[in-house]
Amino acid sequence: MILTKENLKNIDTAKVIVPAEDLLSLPEKVLQFGTGVLLRGLPDYFVDKANRQGIFNGRIVIVKSTGNGDTSDFDNQDSLYTIGVRGIEDGKNVEENIVSSAISRVISAEKDWSAILEVAIDPELKLVVSNTTEVGIQLLNEPVAGNPPASFPGKLLAVLYERYKALGNTANAGLVVIATELIPENGKKLEVIVYELAAYNLLEDEFINWSKASNIFCNSLVDRIVPGKPDAAKLAELKDELGYEDQLLILAEPYRLWAVEGNDKVAGVLSFMQADKGLIVKPDIEIYRELKVRLLNGTHTLTSGIACLSGIDTVKDGMDNADVLNFVEQVMRKEIAPAIPYQVSLEEALVFSGTVIDRFANPHIKHLWLSITVQYAMKMKIRVLPVLFNYHTLFNTIPPFITFGFAAFLHFMRSSKLEGGKYYGSFNGLKYVINDDSAAYFYRKTVEVNEAEYVEEVLNDPEFWGADLNEIPGFIEVVENDYDNILEKGITAALENLNRKLKAVK
């Protein structure tokens, strides 16, 4: 049995949350650029949840722009799909299956652009959401009268212009546009490009004035782990569990956050925020970015080298190791949380850190530590250095867990082999690929400098770090000591000694 509208009545509602029939005919209020799993697992999840509570009462039209424009997977299932929520929330196991009816249809931009323009002029339309990857928000000077325009900003401008021509110069015709692409200031960057493209197309001033007064472009931050489509074995397992076949099925962790930068008008359009605390609309969302980048991403970064050198493959496996778990808890709660370089209360940071522990321990998400080491050096600079400097400013001391993470990073990045254009590291018989734009730099340091001088040579390079680490007196010496302990005792014993020593001090 395939998941379709006709087959909903045959699904076991004891296992699956199934939409009521009236939800399948709600008006189309959202135009979404992108069919990816993140959008279907986060914004579309919120819309579906609100519809089931009678709050938003609107569905989503999706524009498919990539590939050959084929929409058959969605057409075959009447755009229904299952969201399997799996993981840990507040220390408790969560397992939930939801058939989402949030999507009304998926339209190929390449094959049926006129249908998308018909949606653009629908008075019921209130919201545009995008996730076209970072490459999508780029300026391509092109005529927007194309069929369709090639770029996403071009398509969006064509939608806005068509709406203006059909509905007139009225504030009620305006839309809220929310970008979810993983770049800073995503909505504002999109807005700048759209108006640059409008100027290139010599669109009339009346349209520009209407658009700037009536359409609102919002920055947003998305945070939920939604892995890609499960493999064939997992799909077969879920088919047996649910009692039907679903080629669009996605799995998602319980944690969800969509922080949208907007005013009361935006909050009114996003009325579905009433259905779930994970959707937040505020004039300033930087605090959510800082919490995520410092506590989740920063902890990931500082722990990844330790775990990899210990032969631990996944984040979940790391949480099952007492010493790695202790490192994660201590570095996050004792060193990062009190030193986030933003006005955030320690209580709020500690609450967020609790959700991070749950997410790291999720047995349903196979997140490889080696994947987290991709662009390791850049992540240390962006995610960790600001916290390190702020910690020293606030407490006039050196954070011992962060320094140990630095030492593990330097061990991991010490490149011993160049082969086929790839750099490799090795530690205690373990060999691995160093996937980092700075790999050549560390390879040169490995070749040119003996190991006794390696740490000092790298950390004393302000051009590389974009900062002078000597401004933290004693930091380089502490990292050197940790580096030597790891070299002499091995990563496992060195970490165990660190945990034991600091526990004894407290």
Image (cartoon, rainbow, N blue to C red):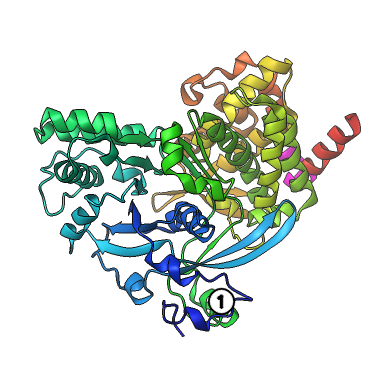
- In the rendering, at what x and y percent does residue 403 appear? 69, 30
Q: Nearer the viewer, residue 254 or 5?
A: 5
Left or right of 321, for residue 407: left
Q: Residue at x 44, y 81 (%)?
A: 2
Q: Residue at x 81, y 43 (%)?
A: 496
Left or right of 265, for residue 450: right
Left or right of 405, for residue 438: left
- In the rendering, at what x and y percent does residue 22 appear? 44, 68
Magenta stretch, residue numbers: 485-493
- In the rendering, at what x and y percent does residue 155 appear? 21, 47
Residue 435 visible? The answer is no
Whether 144 is drawn above or below 205: the answer is below
- In the rendering, at what x and y percent does residue 252 appear? 55, 59
Identified by mark 1, the residue type is Leu
Question: Which residue reaches farthest right?
Answer: 504
Residue 386 visible? The answer is yes
Q: Where is the C terminus found, in terms of image quarters?
A: top right
Q: Which residue is mark 1?
A: 238
Does residue 488 belong to the magenta stretch?
Answer: yes
Q: Residue at x 10, y 31 (%)?
A: 204
Whether 245 is drawn above or below 63: the answer is below
